[in-house]
Image (cartoon, rainbow, N blue to C red):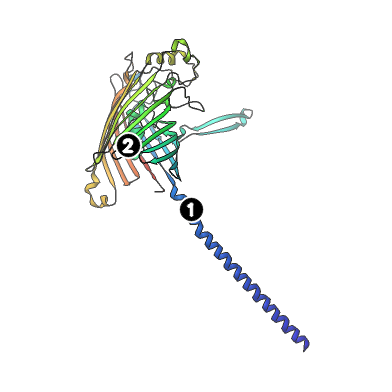
Amino acid sequence: MHSRIITKNRKRMKEKVLMLILLITTAVGHVTAVEKDSESNKEPSKIENVMSRLTIGGYGEAVYSYNMYSDKYMRYLSPERYKDETHGRFDLPHVVIFLGYDFGKGWTMGSEIEFEHGGTESAMEIEEEEAGEYESEIERGGEVALEQFWIQKSFMPQLNVRIGHIIVPVGGTNMHHMPTEFFGVYRPEGENTIMPCTWHETGISIWGRAGDWRYEALLVPGLDSDRFGRMGWIHDGAGSPYEFKIGNAVAGAFRVDNFSVPGLRLSVSGYVGNSFSNTLSANRNSTRYKDVKGTVMIGAFDFNYTGHNWIVRGNFDYGHLSDAETITKVNINNMSQDSPSPHQAVASAAIAGGIEAGYNIFAHIGKLADKGQKFYVFGRYDYYDSMHETDTDIYNFCGRSRVAAGINYYPLKDIVIKGEYSIGLLESPYNNEPAISVGIAYSGFFTR
């Protein structure tokens, strides 16, 4: 009897202990669940706050061209020899990733990494068949560049200060260079030939907008005259083959836009800066060259009209280089053969002008227009000459007209499919340069 009582008491004790454990476990589980719910409620707010301040975007282009002319570098020296040659090209002209962040209190950051022509692919290998030597292999050409990196303080819409690596907005293409902002498969050829494009420098910019006016003024490093040439005038002078940008000379640039007329933007821009001293060449400070400046001056006008289903764009650019004859002699005769200079003549003036117009025929097809689709049929004419004024007339192949016609189909606002036929018209005895090009591109911001 006594043993039965003990057994029952033990059984009741076990039941009480189990009940206590169950209650504790339930309570702990409830507290943990509450804590997790509390954390989960806090976490989305933090993420949402960060995402509301973050801007992610970019643009990219994929292109195929069938060029019905030779791509040999000797084609202008012996045009008859290369008259019937053709070549095709697949290309990724530009793929860009943009990241921006709003720190608050008027402070923002922007950055842009650009992969030109597919970027670069290089690798180091050990050649077992050659005594284990290390060799560098290049699998793909192209460039990778930090096109923008700036910190900006905004005081008011009329006054913003931007410091860092910034776009120099001289000409229409430098300011509006995304693939949805021009009709051609490639960027407008004239401005893209005679000026850096996209032109980016490390410097300071002050900009703002008041009513129908927008302005921007910049201080940036000068160009490097060692890298000027006949085919591109100052095009390569903005780059640097070194791990830094030479800053012996400082240049100024500006841009003013007006939006007074609905649908119409009118813009003027310009640049001035010395280039001859902005080099590492030792002889530039000698008495012989004390008066040589190599001053680059550029004036540009561009416009954009959008309305009545039309988009019409145009540009005109004129550039002057002082001391061009001296720079030509120095680059050809005084630069070492292993220098980054092209060792070519450079003109005292270059010119580029172009106009394009496109009409959206989907505006007359209700179902497609309601879906936001657009289909532009366009035409474009360019004239440019990188050797517009020079002491010799042997560089007539540097000046040409270019005519293009094609289509731009927008299935969505930020995506465009392009196709065009173009022909570069050169003076005799040089061969004309016809081509057929197709491409697809996108441009937009993913976090807006």
> Which residue is outermost to the front?
155
State the image coordinates of residue 129 (x, y, percent, origin top left): 61, 30
Q: Provide the residue designation for mark 2.
A: 214
Q: Secondary structure at mark 1?
A: helix
Q: Residue at x 50, y 33 (%)?
A: 139
Q: Position of residue 307 (x, y in %)?
A: 23, 42
Q: Which residue is mark 1?
A: 47
Of the two numbered discs 2 and 1 in the rendering, the one whose residue sits closer to the viewer: 2
Residue closer to the observer: 433 or 223: 223
**Left or right, 128 with reference to 386:** right
Q: Quadrant of residue 21?
A: bottom right
Q: Is residue 436 left or right of residue 44?
A: left
Q: Residue shown at 43%/43% (left/top)?
A: 106
Q: Describe residue 250's horizontal placement relative to residue 186 as left or right.
A: right
The amino acid beneath tag 2 is: Arg
Badge 2 marks a residue whose secondary structure is strand
Vertical side of 340 occupied by 354: above or below = below
Q: Is tag 2's residue or tag 1's residue first in the polypeptide sequence?
A: 1
In what quadrant of the picture does the N terminus appear? bottom right
- Name above or below for residue 250 compared with residue 205: above
Residue density around tag 1, few if under 14, some if 14–19, many if 20 or more, within 10 Å: few
**Where residue 62 appears, x then y in whole percent?**
39, 39
* Drawn side of residue 38 relative to residue 249, left or right: right
Residue 265 at what x, y percent from top left?
Answer: 27, 37
- Residue at figure coordinates x 65%, y 74% from the top left: 20
Q: Amino acid at mark 1?
A: Ile
Q: Which of the two residues, 358 or 89, is positioned nearer the viewer here?
A: 358
Among the 4 quarters of the image, the one containing residue 93 = top left
Query: Up-down: is 434 above or below 95?
Result: above
